[in-house]
């Protein structure tokens, strides 16, 4: 019988409680300041990052391949036969390619590295759904086959206060050139089928951004039952307002608040982000 391990990078923004509950192995990004380095989520919190950002925007680096190999060897020693690794979109990071190449040379476990083509809890939900499939006793081949379908049912929408951090981090992609800062125009950003950012629509000010996010959420629930995860990056009040409004929509199976953007992503989005992940459910 397959004994399947599950790994993900820290950009998935899965909370510690769920990591422990489902025995998910975390591969942290590095947060690199001029005077100190941190393992994302393990050695630095989002609150600390936002305190430090006005002084210095740190760099980030990929999860350690040495750490990956150490985890895989430990899992093999513990009797695991297979490992599934879910990563951030390859459009935002080299993590997928580096993990895939590393696993090609690892022969103690049969591995599958899956590109979520997303980030934050849109990536995290794929991981959690895979964890539930493992709990149900699905085989490695069955789960690998189901992952693309899981990914196709999950979308992400969010707004941010400023594009400054995306610009400086080189992550702006197709969002570039769409915002007039002087006019207080803010983007509602999503991720396309290729795993890149794109502007879904624009709003003038925070109140209109919230209204447009709610309208998008409602469009999903008109013909589908849906689960929602409301996220924020140092914008909890806005996230709470959005969550309460989504809960009042029809066909909302669940709406959870409290999924903070982790330090590795917060470096590139800055404070003032809020939005949601939505999953269509059968």
Image (spheres, rainbow, N blue to C red):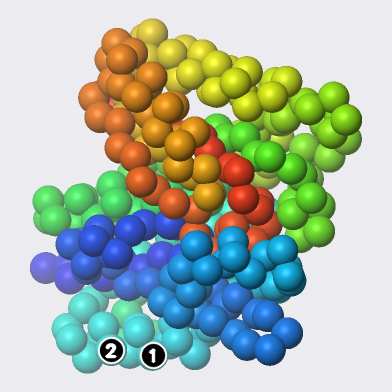
Q: Dot 2, how many residues are within 10 Å of its Cα: few (below 14), some (14-19), or many (20+)?
A: few
- Circles 2 and 1, Cβ within 8 Å, touching? The answer is yes
Q: Is residue 209 visible in the rendered structure shown here?
A: yes
Q: Is residue 268 left or right of residue 113?
A: right
The disc label shown at residue 74, or none = 2
Query: Image quarter for residue 210?
Result: top right
- Across the whole image, how many numbered discs are drawn on residues? 2
Task: Say what secondary structure mark 2 lies in.
Answer: helix
Q: Is residue 48 left or right of residue 3?
A: right
The CA span between labels 2 and 1 is 6 Å
Image quadrant holding the N terminus, namely bottom left
Residue at the spot x=57%, y=35% of the render? Answer: 158
Q: Is residue 194 visible in the rendered structure shown here?
A: no
- The residue nearer to you, when weighing 17 against 98, is 17
Q: Position of residue 282 (x, y in %)?
A: 25, 24
Residue at the spot x=74%, y=43% of the render? Answer: 162
Q: Is residue 242 left or right of residue 138?
A: right
């Amino acid at each position: 019988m397959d004994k399947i391990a599950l790994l993900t990078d820290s950009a998935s923004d899965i909370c510690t409680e769920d990591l422990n509950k489902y025995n998910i192995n975390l591969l942290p990004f590095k947060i690199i300041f001029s005077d100190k380095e941190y393992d994302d989520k393990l050695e630095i919190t989002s609150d600390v990052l936002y305190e430090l950002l006005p002084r210095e925007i740190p760099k980030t680096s990929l999860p350690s391949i040495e750490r990956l190999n150490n985890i895989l060897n430990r899992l093999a020693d513990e009797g695991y036969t297979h490992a599934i690794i879910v990563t951030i979109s390859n459009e935002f990071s080299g993590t997928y390619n580096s993990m895939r190449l590393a696993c090609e040379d690892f022969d103690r476990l049969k591995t599958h590295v899956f590109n979520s083509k997303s980030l934050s809890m849109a990536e995290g939900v794929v991981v959690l759904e895979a964890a539930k499939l493992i709990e149900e006793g699905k085989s490695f081949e069955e789960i690998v086959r189901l992952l693309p379908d899981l990914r196709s049912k999950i979308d992400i929408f969010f707004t941010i206060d400023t594009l400054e951090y995306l610009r400086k981090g080189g992550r702006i992609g197709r969002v570039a050139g769409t915002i007039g800062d002087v006019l207080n125009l803010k983007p509602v950003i999503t991720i396309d089928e290729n795993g890149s950012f794109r502007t879904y629509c624009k709003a003038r000010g925070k109140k209109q951004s919230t209204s447009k996010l709610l309208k998008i959420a409602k469009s999903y629930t008109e013909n589908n039952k849906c689960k929602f995860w409301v996220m924020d990056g140092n914008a909890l009040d806005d996230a709470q307002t959005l969550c309460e409004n989504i809960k009042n929509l029809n066909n909302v199976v669940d709406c959870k608040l409290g999924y903070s953007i982790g330090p590795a992503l917060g470096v590139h989005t800055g404070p003032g982000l809020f939005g949601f992940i939505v999953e269509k459910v059968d």
